[in-house]
Amino acid sequence: MYFQCKIKADKMSAESGGIKQTSEVYLVDALTFAEAETRVLTEQAPYVSGSIEVDTCKKVNVSGLIDDDNPQSDKWYKVKVMSVNFDEEKQVEKKVANYFYVHAATLMDALKLLHEQELRHWQTDYDIVSATDTPIMDVYKFTTNEKKN
């Protein structure tokens, strides 16, 4: 389950060298709101020069994450893909919304990556109905203690 957490923190400004209050959004893989908030605070603590707090935390529907290895990829795009599934019991077609977050340099790169890594494997009809730039700074995926060590 993914949560979108917005934090407010006092960070060192690269331009002026002074401390500036920033507002940033992160996507966190967690089981509960409390775990998501704790995780984003823990991950951001080394970069904060003063206070830090979670402003908002909400569940988001994520069907998949696609992360480009390109160092120029600096944006996260949210792409909504509607797939058409057939309900055998009711004998009707059913549209299902799928939300993908794609890390890429441009919107065109994001759509290309989504197609190459996910959509070309689909055996059903689909339509990309929206693709938008997000304010997400980073994604914190779930890791176990064994993977960290």
Image: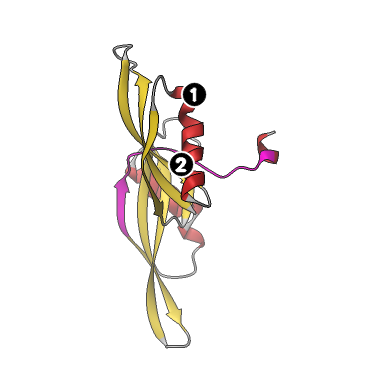
Residue 100 % position (x, y): 42, 53
Query: N-terminal of the two: label 1 or label 2?
Result: 2
The structure residue drawn at horizontal position 39% and vertical position 42%, both measured from the top left corner, is 5
The crowd level at tag 2 (other Cα within 10 Å; few <14, some 14-19, many 20+) is many
Residue at 50% across, 32% down: 43
Q: What amino acid does circle 1 point to?
A: Pro
Residue at the image position 37 percent from the left and 61 percent from the top:
81
Q: Residue at x 44, y 55 (%)?
A: 62
Q: Choose between 98 and 34: the one closer to the eye.
A: 34
Horizontal side of residue 122 vs 110, given as left or right: right
Going by the image, does 66 lie left or right of 75?
A: right
In the rendered view, how is the structure colored?
Answer: secondary structure
Q: Does dot 2 land on a helix, a strand or a loop?
A: helix
Q: Which residues are magenta?
A: 129-145
Q: Position of residue 103 (x, y in %)?
A: 43, 41
Q: Which mark is residue 46?
A: 1
